[in-house]
């Protein structure tokens, strides 16, 4: 019999935990300790994961690509990710997936995050005065700012290979950190089951409705984003909309069914060149970099998830708090590394920063596989449309492929 995948195990753990919580009620609430241990094990590697991933992605770029093409790529990544995060908030406002249920009584650790009233102080707090202090406190925004600057300096200093040892060392640390996260993620089914048992033991069945509403809001938001992105790219790159959508058919299918940007990358690179007309040089630069630094789907997911959780915990959101959610959703995507349960890892970055209890992550963990379908599609489509846009700018887009009939999708 085929072994159940990690996402399947997490989903099963969520169901088992929910049933156990409903059966035994408050007397089983002590099992929350196992879930909290799991969350701490994830959190202990998150800052190092982001720190190394950003340095490797920027430091490993070819010197000739860091300037012009790097700037264009970063601009497209930032623009689409920002729009996705804003759309995630908009879907939260329109559909209110967390309305009507307040879970603040579930945890004494829930705190209302008070944003500074001075916008200039908020901006100043993005920049670290001491990187070791930022690392120790887990200040993700400050860590990423330092990592970006360090990556640029490393890239420039290593043009003649003088610092290959440092870049190799960073890559090796990243590989070990990913292995560490993957090791901890093996305990995810147990940790999520424990947290879900605690949630349902203290809240009952009323927690299920927000999960369904969240998926509906995320699915609708994903559809709106894709339609808008395809229409814009058809106009920007001067390619037929029908041909553009047909060219993306296999990429979307693989991304949706595997929920893995890493698995989709080979198909993405092949179809970007053969079905969407992107030159090999552009696709080899943009698509691997996009897998590490660009996550439209994750940005929308995080913004919508944060909005939903703040509703569930009865937190009032000021305009500055909404801006903070969008910025955190965008910045958290900069260090995204493709590991199983990446959505859960990203939530451990953003949720505590907003003053929400880390155990609230369990509420959305049970549907993470379904959320991952939409996240992955938006991620790979965002990467590939960026490649198309840059290829069009650089006159390296073969528009003739859009007139060809593509063969039916084959199983690889």
Image (spheres, rainbow, N blue to C red):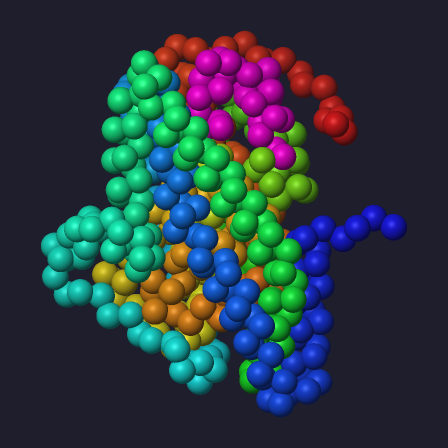
Task: State the residue at coordinates (61%, 33%).
Answer: 264
Q: Report the side of 254 relative to 207 (left or right).
A: right
Query: Residue at the bottom extreme?
Result: 27
Q: Is residue 255 visible?
A: yes
On the image, the x and y values in percent for residue 165 come to 39, 26
Q: Chief secondary structure of the magenta span?
A: helix
On the image, the x and y values in percent for residue 212 come to 59, 65
Find residue 56 and report its image quarter.
top left
Find residue 304 and report its image quarter.
bottom left
> In the rendered structure, does residue 279 fall within the stretch colored magenta?
yes
Query: Residue at the right extreme?
Result: 1
- Stretch in magenta: 263-289
Q: Report the side of 290 relative to 151 (left or right).
A: right
On the image, the x and y values in percent for residue 188 come to 61, 60
Task: State the residue at coordinates (33%, 75%).
Answer: 111
Q: Nearer the viewer, residue 103 or 177?
A: 177
- Number of numbered labels in the structure image: 0
Task: State the residue at coordinates (32%, 14%).
Answer: 160
Q: Nearer the viewer, residue 18 or 161?
A: 161
> In the rendered structure, does residue 146 fall within the stretch colored magenta?
no
Q: Nearer the viewer, residue 113 or 164?
A: 164
Q: Is residue 227 visible?
A: no
Quick one: quadrant of the C terminus?
top right
Find residue 186 and report its image quarter.
bottom right
- Residue 212 drawn above or below residue 406: below
On the image, the x and y values in percent for residue 221 come to 48, 50
Task: State the residue at coordinates (56%, 45%).
Answer: 179
Q: Report the side of 386 relative to 122 (left or right).
A: right
- Residue 81 drawn above or below residue 351: above
């Amino acid at each position: 019999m085929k072994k159940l995948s990690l996402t399947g195990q997490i989903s099963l753990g969520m169901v088992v935990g929910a049933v156990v919580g409903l059966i035994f009620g408050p007397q089983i609430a002590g099992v929350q300790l196992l879930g909290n241990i799991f969350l701490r094990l994830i959190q202990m590697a998150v800052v190092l994961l982001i720190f190394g991933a950003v340095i490797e992605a920027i430091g490993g770029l070819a010197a000739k690509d860091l300037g012009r093409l790097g700037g264009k790529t970063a601009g497209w990544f930032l623009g689409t990710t920002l729009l996705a995060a804003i759309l995630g908030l908009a879907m939260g406002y329109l559909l209110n997936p967390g309305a009507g249920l307040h879970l603040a009584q579930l945890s004494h650790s829930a705190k209302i995050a008070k944003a500074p009233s001075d916008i200039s102080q908020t901006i100043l707090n993005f920049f670290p005065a001491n990187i070791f202090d930022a690392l120790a406190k887990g200040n993700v925004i400050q860590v990423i700012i330092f990592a970006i600057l360090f990556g640029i300096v490393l890239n420039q200093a290593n043009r003649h290979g003088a610092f290959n040892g440092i870049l190799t060392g960073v890559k090796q640390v990243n590989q070990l950190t990913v292995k560490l996260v993957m090791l901890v993620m093996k305990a995810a089914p147990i940790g999520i089951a424990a947290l879900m048992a605690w949630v349902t033991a203290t809240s009952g069945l009323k927690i299920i409705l927000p999960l369904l509403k969240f998926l509906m809001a995320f699915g609708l938001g994903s559809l709106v984003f894709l339609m808008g992105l395809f229409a814009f790219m058809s106009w920007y790159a001067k390619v037929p909309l029908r041909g553009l959508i047909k060219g993306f058919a296999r990429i979307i299918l693989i991304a949706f069914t595997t929920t893995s940007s890493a698995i989709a990358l080979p198909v993405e690179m092949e179809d970007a060149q053969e079905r969407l007309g992107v030159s090999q040089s552009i696709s080899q630069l943009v698509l691997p970099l996009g897998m590490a630094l660009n996550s439209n789907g994750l940005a929308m997911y995080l913004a919508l998830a944060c909005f939903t959780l703040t509703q569930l915990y009865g937190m009032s959101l000021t305009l500055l708090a909404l801006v903070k959610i969008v910025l955190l959703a965008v910045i958290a995507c900069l260090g995204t590394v493709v590991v199983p349960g990446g959505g859960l890892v990203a939530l451990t970055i953003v949720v505590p920063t907003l003053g929400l209890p880390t155990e609230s992550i369990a509420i959305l963990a049970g549907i993470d596989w379904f959320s991952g379908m939409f996240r992955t599609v938006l991620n790979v489509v965002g990467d590939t449309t960026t490649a198309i846009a840059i290829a069009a700018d650089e006159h390296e887009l073969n528009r003739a492929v859009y007139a060809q009939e593509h063969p039916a999708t084959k199983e690889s």
